[in-house]
Image (spheres, grey):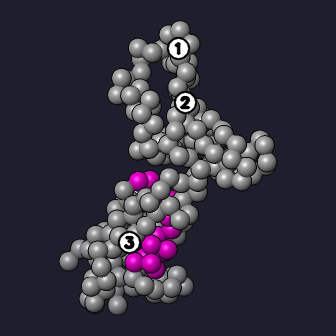
């Protein structure tokens, strides 16, 4: 039987960017946007706060866009300070590249395994699904989900008792499956 695990975000990730006021490198997003219109051109920013000094920085979302080219639903979500939109935009590679930021997902996600009754079998087939693009080491997920140490998971991989179609070293942010043979 195939067990399903889900990696879900619990909050917005920490934004890694240098603060101009205090030289800190961590900002937190609270889902607030600033929209500015200059005649028919529109600018929009996601506001982030420095975790040390509280200084506000702006992450560019829209820059000098014609008002008619912006979807009305997007404009409404920007005006409503939609936190789901903030999460979506932080995960957009184009937004991260344009603003030269990285995301730190530590303590911003959880693993839902559906209980521990799935660990009783001789062979365990697990499908891991990501609710958002959260880069996590598969070894960490498997260790947490199965109640093992990371060293034990590494040993199972080298022994060939833990197999997957994807490479289990490094970080993944996409769905994968694995089989654990006890």
**Dot 1 crowding, Cα within 10 Å, few <14, some 14–19, many 20+:** some
Q: Are marks 2 and 1 in contact (CB under 8 Å)?
A: no
Q: Position of residue 119 (x, y in %)?
A: 31, 86
**Could you tell me which residue is drawn at 34 percent across and 28 percent down?**
73
The residue tagged 1 is 41
**Could you tell me which residue is drawn at 35 percent across and 70 percent down?**
112
Q: Is residue 89 above or below residue 64?
A: below
Mark earlier in primary sequence (3, 2): 2
**Could you tell me which residue is drawn at 57 percent across and 41 percent down?**
96
* Magenta stretch contains residue 56: no
- Magenta part of the chain: 132-145
The disc placed on residue 152 is none
- Measured Cα–Cα span from mark 3 to mark 2: 45 Å
Q: Is residue 91 left or right of residue 5?
A: right
Q: Are marks 3 and 1 in contact (CB under 8 Å)?
A: no
Residue located farthest toward the top when viewing the structure as drawn: 39
The residue tagged 3 is 164
Q: Position of residue 42 (x, y in %)?
A: 52, 18
SS type, badge 2: strand
**Could you tell me which residue is drawn at 46 percent across and 63 percent down?**
109
Q: Position of residue 145 (x, y in %)?
A: 40, 78
The residue tagged 2 is 34
Could you say which is closer to the camera, residue 119 or residue 177? Answer: 119
Could you say which is closer to the camera, residue 52 or residue 14? Answer: 52
| Residue 78 found in image quarter | top left
Could you say which is closer to the camera, residue 158 or residue 60? Answer: 60
Q: Position of residue 175 (x, y in %)?
A: 36, 60
Quarter of the C terminus within the rendering: bottom left
SS type, badge 3: strand
Mark earlier in primary sequence (2, 1): 2
């Amino acid at each position: 039987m195939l067990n399903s695990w889900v990696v879900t975000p619990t909050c917005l990730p920490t934004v890694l960017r240098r603060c101009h006021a205090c030289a800190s490198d961590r900002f937190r997003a609270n889902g607030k946007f600033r929209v500015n219109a200059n005649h028919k051109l529109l600018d929009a920013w996601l506001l982030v706060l420095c975790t040390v000094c509280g200084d506000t920085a702006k992450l560019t979302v829209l820059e000098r866009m014609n008002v008619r080219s912006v979807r009305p639903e997007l404009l409404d979500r920007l005006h409503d300070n939609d936190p789901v939109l903030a999460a979506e935009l932080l995960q957009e590679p184009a937004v991260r590249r344009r603003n030269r930021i990285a995301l730190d997902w530590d303590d911003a996600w959880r693993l839902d395994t559906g209980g521990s009754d799935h660990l009783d079998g001789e062979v365990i087939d697990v499908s891991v699904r990501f609710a958002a693009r959260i880069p996590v080491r598969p070894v960490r997920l498997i260790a947490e989900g199965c109640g093992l140490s990371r060293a034990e998971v590494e040993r199972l991989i080298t022994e060939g008792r833990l197999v997957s179609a994807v490479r289990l070293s490094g970080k993944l942010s996409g769905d994968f499956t694995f089989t654990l043979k006890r």
